[in-house]
C-alpha cells in the first residue's frame, strides 16, 4: 500500500499542516559514486554550489550597522555586513591587493575592515578607503579603486542567503515553501545559543539522507519510541524543498503499551511547563494536554505569534529541508539549523554545522526544553553570541545522545557506500524526501537548471 500517513488527516486543504499530494520522482537507483567520487564532487562545485542560494547565517548575528559574520563554502569565504541603511550586503572575504582574508573572525562589529597583511582599508559597503603608500603604485593599477567583490545577498524569515554566481532566480521565487511557513516562527527574534561544527567521515549527501527520514528511529534511536511517533508525514515542495512532521509527546505505534504515562512523557510535560503529577489521563491524551498548556503559557506571556500556529506545531517537529544542504527543525521555542557543508577537497568528509536558536523569555516557567540538548550552563539569554565550537575527527562535541548515535551511523554508511557490494540506495516511500533531494541535485548536474 502507498505510504499516506498524515498527522492530521482532517487538516483543511489550505492549512500548512495539510498533507500534500505525492510527487512522482521515479524509481531510479542512483550510482553510489555520487557518495565518494572526486569527479562527482568537482561537478557539484562547478554546477551546484555556485548556482543555488546558500544559507549563510541568521539575521540575529548582524543586527546593528557594522555587524558582520563570515561564511565558508569550499575554498570561498563570504563576508556579510549590516549597512548603515539597515540593508545587508555580502562580499568575497578577500583583499583586492594580494588575496588575504579581510575578516579573520567568525563574527564582529567594525566601522571598516583593515587587511592585516598590508593595511589596505575597506568600508563596510566594500569600497576601498585607503591604500597604504598609494603613491608607490602606478596610478593605472589602482585608478578603478578596487574594492571588495560583491555577491548577491538576500534574507527570508530571519535567515541570510547568498548566491555566488549571481544567476539564481530571486530568493522569493526560489524558496519552495508556502507563504508564512517559516515566517510564523519569527526566527529573527531568536538568538543563537550554541553553534557547533564537527567533521564527519562521509559525503555531505549521506548527512542529508540520514536526517531526511524517521524510518531509522526504532533501530538506531530506540529510546525515542516512548515520546515520538516514527511514522512521520512527508511532504515535497518545489525546488527540492521538503518537510517531515514528526509527532512528539506520543508513543510510537510500535510500542505495545499505549496507555501508561511513563517517564518519557512525563519528561515532555515538564518541559512544556506542566506538572506531570497533575495529569490524570492516559498516554494518548498527553500531546493534546501539552498543546493546551503551551497555548495558555504563551497567552500569559504575551507571545502573540503562537496564534499563527496550528495545535500540532506546538508539540511536533516540522523538520524542513532547504535545498541543497540545510534542515531546520522548527519549534515555537526555538529552531535547530543543520547545515551539511561539503569538504573543499575530500568527497568522503563533510562539516556538520548545528546552530541552536532560542527565544528567551524572562519567566521561570519558560525555559529551554531539555530535548534541545544544550549542555548545562549554556547562556540562553542571547546577551552574547557564543563562539563556534569546532571539533575534529573523533572528538566528542557533546551533541546529545541521539546525535552522537547519528555520528556513528553516518560514518558507517559513508564507508559502506564505497563497497563493491553496494549497488545504490533503494528508497522506500518513507524516504521520499531523499529521492526528491537527489532528483533536484541531478537537475543541476545535468543542466536542467
Image: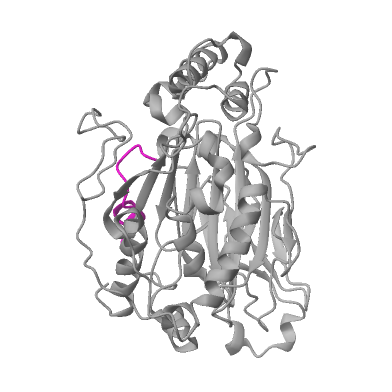
Image position, residue 98 (x, y; %): 68, 84
Rendered position, 95 above or below 280: below
Residue 157 lies left or right of residue 132; in this view the side is left
Quarter of the image for residue 174 reads: bottom left
Residue 16 lies left or right of residue 68; in this view the side is left
Rendered position, 118 above or below 232: below
Q: Quadrant of the C terminus?
A: bottom left
Residue 223 lies left or right of residue 312; in this view the side is right
Residue 29 painted magenta: no
Depth check, front residue: 46 or 396 = 396
Image position, residue 224 (x, y; %): 55, 41
Quarter of the image for residue 438 reads: bottom left
Image position, residue 17 (x, y; %): 31, 34
Depth check, front residue: 224 or 435 = 224
Residue 173 painted magenta: yes
**What residue sits 75% from the left and 59% below the top?**
396
Rendered position, 239 above or below 121: above
Provide the residue span drawn in magenta: 169-181
Q: Main secondary structure of the magenta part?
A: loop
Rendered position, 228 above or below 392: above
Depth check, front residue: 237 or 153 = 237
Image position, residue 48 (x, y; %): 40, 74
The outermost residue toward the front is 256
**Residue 191 appears anywhere in the view:** no
**What residue sits 46% from the left and 15% below the top?**
292
**Residue 93 appears anywhere in the view:** yes
Amino acid at each position: 500500500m502507498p505510504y499516506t500517513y498524515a498527522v492530521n488527516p482532517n487538516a483543511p486543504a489550505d492549512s500548512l499542516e495539510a498533507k500534500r499530494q505525492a510527487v512522482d520522482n521515479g524509481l531510479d537507483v542512483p550510482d553510489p559514486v555520487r557518495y565518494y567520487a572526486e569527479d562527482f564532487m568537482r561537478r557539484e562545485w562547478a554546477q551546484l554550489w555556485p548556482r543555488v542560494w546558500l544559507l549563510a547565517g541568521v539575521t540575529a548575528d548582524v543586527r546593528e550597522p557594522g555587524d558582520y559574520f563570515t561564511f565558508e563554502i569550499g575554498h570561498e569565504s563570504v563576508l556579510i555586513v549590516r549597512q548603515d541603511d539597515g540593508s545587508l550586503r555580502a562580499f568575497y572575504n578577500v583583499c583586492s591587493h594580494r588575496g588575504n582574508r579581510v575578516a579573520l573572525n567568525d563574527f564582529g562589529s567594525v566601522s571598516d575592515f583593515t587587511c592585516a597583511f598590508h593595511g589596505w582599508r575597506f568600508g563596510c559597503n566594500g569600497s576601498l578607503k585607503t591604500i597604504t603608500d598609494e603613491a608607490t603604485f602606478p596610478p593605472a593599477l589602482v585608478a578603478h579603486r578596487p574594492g571588495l567583490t560583491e555577491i548577491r545577498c538576500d534574507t527570508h524569515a530571519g535567515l541570510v542567503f547568498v548566491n555566488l554566481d549571481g544567476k539564481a532566480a530571486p530568493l522569493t521565487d526560489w524558496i519552495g515553501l508556502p507563504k508564512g511557513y517559516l515566517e510564523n516562527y519569527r526566527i529573527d527574534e531568536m538568538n543563537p545559543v550554541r553553534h557547533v561544527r564537527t567533521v564527519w567521515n562521509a559525503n555531505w549527501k549521506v548527512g542529508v539522507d540520514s536526517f531526511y527520514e524517521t524510518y531509522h528511529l526504532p533501530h538506531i534511536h530506540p529510546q525515542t519510541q516512548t515520546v515520538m511517533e516514527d511514522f512521520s508525514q512527508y511532504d515535497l515542495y518545489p525546488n527540492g524543498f521538503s518537510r517531515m512532521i514528526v509527532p512528539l509527546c506520543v508513543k510510537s505505534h510500535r510500542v505495545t503499551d499505549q496507555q501508561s504515562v511513563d517517564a518519557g512523557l512525563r519528561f515532555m510535560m515538564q518541559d512544556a511547563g506542566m506538572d506531570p503529577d497533575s495529569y490524570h489521563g492516559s498516554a494518548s491524551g498527553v500531546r493534546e494536554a501539552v498543546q493546551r498548556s503551551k497555548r495558555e503559557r504563551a497567552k500569559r506571556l504575551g507571545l502573540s505569534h503562537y496564534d499563527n500556529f496550528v495545535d500540532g506545531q506546538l508539540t511536533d517537529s516540522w523538520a524542513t529541508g532547504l535545498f541543497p544542504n540545510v534542515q531546520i527543525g522548527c519549534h515555537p521555542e526555538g529552531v535547530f539549523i543543520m547545515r551539511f557543508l561539503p569538504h573543499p577537497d575530500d568527497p568522503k568528509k563533510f562539516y556538520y554545522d548545528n546552530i541552536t536558536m532560542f527565544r528567551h523569555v524572562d519567566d521561570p516557567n519558560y525555559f529551554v526544553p531539555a530535548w534541545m540538548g544544550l549542555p548545562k550552563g549554556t547562556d540562553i539569554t542571547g546577551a552574547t553570541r557564543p563562539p563556534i565550537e569546532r571539533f575534529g575527527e573523533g572528538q566528542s562535541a557533546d551533541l546529545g545522545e541521539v546525535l552522537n548515535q547519528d555520528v556513528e551511523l553516518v560514518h558507517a554508511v559513508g564507508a559502506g557506500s564505497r563497497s563493491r557490494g553496494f549497488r545504490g540506495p533503494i528508497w522506500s516511500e518513507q524516504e521520499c524526501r531523499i529521492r526528491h533531494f537527489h532528483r533536484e541535485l541531478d537537475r543541476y548536474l545535468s543542466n536542467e537548471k
